[in-house]
Amino acid sequence: MAASSESTQMAGPDEVKIDVHDRDAGVPTDADLDVSEEANKQVRFHPQPTITIRSEEPPEQEQTTTLARSDSMRDRRFDHFKTFAGRLERQLSSLRGGSRHPSDDNEPGESKLSEDDTDDDEVPTADRYFAALEGPELETLRPTEVPVLPEDETWPFLLRFPISAFGMCMGVSSQAMLWKTLELENSTAFLHVNRDVNGAFWWLSVALMGLVSATYLLKVVFYFEAVRREFHHPIRVNFFFSPWIACLFLVKGLPEPVGTVHHVVWYVLMAPLLVLDLKVYGQWMSGGEWRLSRVANPTSHLAVVGNFVGALLGARMGLREAAIFFFAVGLVHYVVLFVTLYQRLPTNVPLPRELHPVFFLFIATPSVASVAWARICGEFGHGAKVAYYISLFLYLSLVVRVKFFRGVRFSLAWWAYTFPMTSAAIATAVFASEVKNVLTQALAVVLAGVASVTMAAVLAATMYHAFVRRDLFPNDVSIAIRRRPKAKFGKILARLRTSSADLKELVSRHAGSETSSFSEPPSPMVYDGRGRAEP
């Protein structure tokens, strides 16, 4: 302990004072000796406590390493389908102090995407979808293809939630329209349908529509790349019409009169349909890889039926000219689509068994068209009857082929049964009001019952597979194809070729060495200064 320049006072059993003048003189006194002895005792037997001050924050290098380690442990295999593609996370981590992850080079293979896995940001072409996929809705990867995402584990739920889930909304909301029609039409007045049935189906449709829309909106926010690939899918693109068709069903099936709805609602719902019409019909017309003969399938009816639903609702709301416009657009493209699907060009592969439910979409378009034209004209005239008879014939032609629909594995494609059957039942009820007799009334009741039972059965099966078996939404490999083909065993074959070449070279060298060992050693040659060899 250092003493003060003036005086030193130490705590001890006896208080000791030091004279400053004696210290300045340089002469040690008895007091100095006593003080030194006391100080030595205190230092030896009474040490002062030691206080260590540590910073609560780790050093900058340690903090950067910890952040880099946590970022490297994050699963990056799905970053290619995220909206920000992982760039936001890297920017945030760099702002926290790590400009570059030091463990990027030592990252495990399963949590790191290679350049081959990410490909480019461009979506695959239509021909690439047909070449890489198979199945009812081009949802199964061919055995020779390798997906971008892992196959051996379950993907995030939003990546597995397809746009075709809106088919459930169309099926349930069409039931609200059916029961409202059974309540208001003269042909079914004897049933005395309670108004609460329509209200119950309408509220159920609203709840289901809100749930499905919110889920898919989250997919748009967090996995926009997956949504973009669905939009370029030759079959999935048709399901982008289904949300707006379901909303039109909700307006049409409203328990209140449709005339009370403001016209702005109709314009808001038809604007997206018009944009999609311009997009899809333009591709059909322009040819190329998106030509109609190449991409036509029964789900293409969804791209047409929306025009007739909009025309039906517009006619009920008093928008006659707008209704005629959309009816004309839908009619001309329906004729072309119907002929294309009916002839099934020789180059087209027959539809697999799992896609057979979507054949009922053939019924939906003429059924809705007949009711729409009847509302536009104010009566169920000859034009409406022609469309209705077409739908009725197609309905009967599918029903008599019972074996055609046996053994079909359950999927969301089963909802294709509900909406067309309900549309046929509605058209029959309206037709029975024009041609009223026992046969038409009985037919309206039977078709309405079949449509309701079918919807209930499909809904129950959907709930069972969603909550009991939990296999309703498998991995959606249709959006995980590569932009360029990549054989599954390409790298293995390349390695085998390289190994075989090396093996051949090694065998040839070994054979040459054995041959040289058995031969006699050559005699030494001596070269003279003139470049001639002498033995």
Image: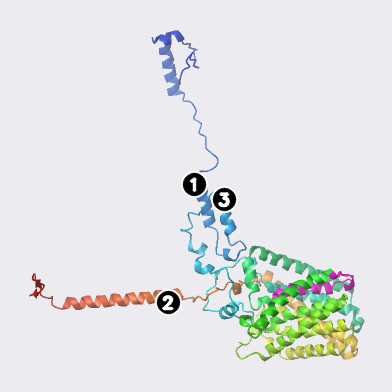
240 is within the stretch colored magenta: yes
Q: How far apart are marks 2 and 1 (CA)?
A: 45 Å
Per the rendered image, the range of residues in magenta is 238-263
Location of residue 526 (image quadrant): bottom left
Location of residue 122 (image quadrant): bottom right
User: Crowdedness of circle 3 by 10 Å Cα count: few (<14), some, many (20+)?
Assistant: few
Q: In this view, does 109 lie to the left or right of 507?
A: right
| Residue 95, disc | 3
Q: Distance between the residues labelled 2 and 3?
A: 45 Å
Which residue of the protein is positioned furthest toward the front in this rendering? 530
| Residue 493, disc | 2
Q: Distance between the residues labelled 1 and 3?
A: 14 Å
Give coordinates of residue 211: x percent, y percent: 74, 66
Q: Is residue 47 left or right of residue 79?
A: left
Which residue is tagged 1? Answer: 61
Q: Which amino acid does label 1 sit on?
A: Gln
Location of residue 272 (image quadrant): bottom right
Q: Quadrant of the N terminus?
A: top left
Q: Are marks 2 and 1 in contact (CB under 8 Å)?
A: no
Q: What residue type is labelled 3?
A: Leu
Give coordinates of residue 269: x percent, y percent: 78, 71
Residue at image location 57% in from the left, 50% down from the top:
95
Residue depth check, mark 2 versus mark 3: number of the one nearer the observer: 3
Q: Which amino acid does label 2 sit on?
A: Leu
Residue 21 sits above or below residue 54 on the image:
above
Residue 41 sits above or below residue 227 on the image:
above
Instruction: Give the mark nearest the N terminus, 1 or 3.
Output: 1
Residue at image location 84% in from the left, 84% down from the top:
373
Residue at image location 48% in from the left, 63% down from the top:
109
- Closer to us: 519 or 462: 519
Residue depth check, mark 1 versus mark 3: number of the one nearer the observer: 3
| Residue 274, disc | none
